[in-house]
Image (cartoon, grey):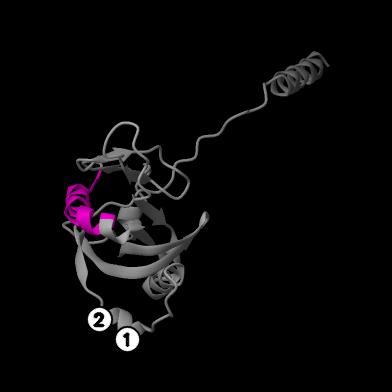
Amino acid sequence: MQRALFGVVLLGLCAALVGCDPPTSTRTLTLPRAVFAAGSPPDDAERLQPAPLSFVYTVPQGWEERPPQEFRQVNLRLAPPEPGAPQPHVECYLTRLPNSAAGVLMNVNRWRKQMGQDPVDDATVSGYPTAPLLGASAVVVDLQGDYTDGHGGHAGYTLLGWILPWGRDAVFVKAVGPSAEIDAERARIGEFLQSLRVKP
C-alpha cells in the first residue's frame, strides 16, 4: 500500500515538473553545408556537413558592402564617386538556391526576360561561355537591353550573370546596371569573382 501511494505521489511530481517547464520560444535550425572537394562540386556526403555555408571575398575598390538579404548572401553595390553624389544603380550579388533552382536554362531565360529578350533553348545555352567560379565552371550570361526590376524599367542596361550548378543546389552571381558603368567595372567585378571562396 505504501509503495503504491509512493508511486502515485512520484508520478504526480513528475507530471507537475513537466507541466512547469517554460515553453520553448526559439529554435536553432542548422542548414546543410556544401563545400568543394578538390575543385569539384560536392557529393551528397559533403552536403550533409552540419554547418551553415558562408563566403569570404574581397570588396572591389569603389564598391561597398550592403547587409545580406533573403536572396542575397553576398550583396555589393557601386559606391558614389564622391560624397554627396547620387548613388549609382549598379549592384552585384550572390545567391545560393536549393535543388539547382530549376536548372541553367530556366534561369538564363528568366534573366533574358528581365532584359526584354526572347527565350533560348538548351542548344543555344550550351554555346555560352564559361568561367571559373568557386573552383568550378559557371555558365556566363552577358545581356544588353532594357532591364525591368521591382522599380520599373531601365533603358540601356547590362546584366552580367554567372550560373553554377552545385551538387543539388545552384549558385548565382548577378551584376546589373547602366551599360557604360558596368563596362567600366568589368575588371573589378572579375576581381570580386576571383576572390570569392567558401569560408572554411
Secondary structure mostly taken by the magenta-highlighted segment of the chain: helix
Q: Which residue is mark 2?
A: 127
In the image, what residue type sits under mark 1? Ala
Q: Which residue is at a point 41% across and 48% down the rendered structure image?
A: 72
Residue 177: percent from left, percent from top? 35, 56
From the viewer's side, name the closer residue of 1 and 130: 130
Quadrant including the N terminus: top right
Q: Is residue 155 above or below residue 47?
A: below
Element on which disc 2 rests: loop
Q: Which residue is at a point 38% across and 71% down the rendered structure image?
A: 108
From the viewer's side, name the closer residue of 77 and 36: 77
Viewer can see residue 53: no
Residue 124: percent from left, percent from top? 31, 83
In the image, what residue type sits under mark 2? Gly
Asked whether the beta carbons under mark 1 and mark 2 sit within 8 Å of each other, the answer is: yes
Residue 145: percent from left, percent from top? 38, 69
Tell me the magenta residue range. 181-198
Q: Is residue 153 left or right of residue 175?
A: right
Q: Is residue 53 above or below residue 160?
A: above
